[in-house]
Amino acid sequence: MTAQLIDGKAIAQQVREEVAAKVSERTAGGKSKPTLATVLVGDRVDSATYVASKQKACAELGMGSISHNLSADISQEDLEKLIKSLNDDMSVHGILVQLPLPAHLNEERVLQLISIEKDVDGFSPINIGRLAQKGREPLFVPCTPYGCIYLLEKAGVKIEGANAVVLGRSNIVGMPAALLLIGKNATVTVCHSRTQDLPGVVRQVDILIAAIGKSEMVRGDWIKPGAAVIDVGINSKPDATRKSGYRLVGDVCFDEAKEVAGFITPVPGGVGPMTIAMLMRNTYRAAEIQDP
Ligand code: NAP
């Protein structure tokens, strides 16, 4: 292996310890406990697991959490009523609506309703708009892309002046990751399902963030020697040697890429743990903004 492994699990643990220390200092000083309200609609097992780990992280870091688990057939009106009541609730600092919502609900309207000071996922149009504008600062940066940039910086990868590719243009990962890289003065190409000659484009760049949701699609010979590779993908691959019958792999073929890249994140143990760590950071920040 030539690449240096970027250990997301260890870096996320450091972030969590820093947040826990700040929370403890804050509450010891008599200020309110940073508190996250989670909103889960329906019974998707993956969404329920994500929400449970976010609540567990709150408890581990000394923060509060309130959960609203709603039936899949809740009306748009009732969901919006709940968001408005959470906006008005002084004991709630952050609001997290677990996505995706069931198809009959208008996700855009729900996200738009979250007060900008409580938008700890960073998905409100105002936060994303600020991220896209030169000289403006969002109150919160979306957690997964925030984690990707944090990992690059912690590993000592130079972003300023680098050529970067982001594979994927989703609202939650690809697009905000590209905006963050531009904000850090990288020159960025965003690729998607209609991009021509992906390997040729990826081969040009010093930094690759892959977020497409396709098992091991990025091969070793796509990578420029020495490049930094951040693999956001979480895909399950059949594996008869595992009790579960599958294992998790990224969007990058790790075994090939690690022989060419300069830096690489593993899956699991790379970007995944950073998402929750950054959510905890944002929730602490939300409490500091609302109850300084
Ligand atoms: P998404 O909403 O499905 O978006 C996928 C993006 O990839 C789209 O922009 C799509 O292009 C592009 N794409 C799909 N197939 C492609 C192909 N063959 N060639 C080039 N581009 C292609 O996915 P997402 O929510 O961003 O998630 C991406 C991956 O990250 C998934 O594996 C997900 O599980 C993982 N994820 C991980 C975390 C974490 O915490 N680690 C958090 C979120 C997501 P079009 O726009 O043209 O359709």
Image (cartoon, rainbow, N blue to C red):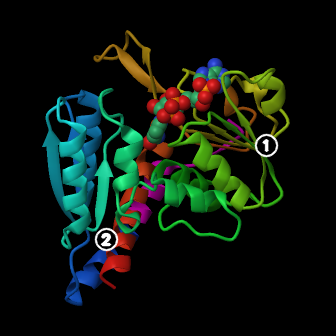
Q: Is residue 84 left or right of residue 113?
A: left
Circle on res. 190: none
Q: Residue at x 38, y 60 (%)?
A: 119
Q: Earlier in the sequence, mark 2 or mark 1?
A: 2
- Classify residue 170 by image quadrant: top right
Q: Residue at x 26, y 64 (%)?
A: 87
Judging depth in this view, the residue of 59 and 40 nearest the camera is 40
Query: Please, what is the three-letter code of the amino acid marked with disc 1?
Result: Gly
Quarter of the image with the C terminus in it: bottom left
Residue 89 image position (x, y, % from top left) = 19, 68
Q: Which residues are magenta?
A: 1-16
The residue labelled by disc 1 is 226
Which secondary structure lies at badge 1?
loop
Q: Is residue 121 left or right of residue 57?
A: right
Q: Is residue 240 above or below residue 92?
A: above
Q: Residue at x 73, y 55 (%)?
A: 182
**Neighbourhood count class around disc 1 (C-alpha, 10 Å): few under 14, some 14–19, many 20 upward:** some
Which secondary structure lies at badge 2?
helix
Q: Residue at x 31, y 52 (%)?
A: 96
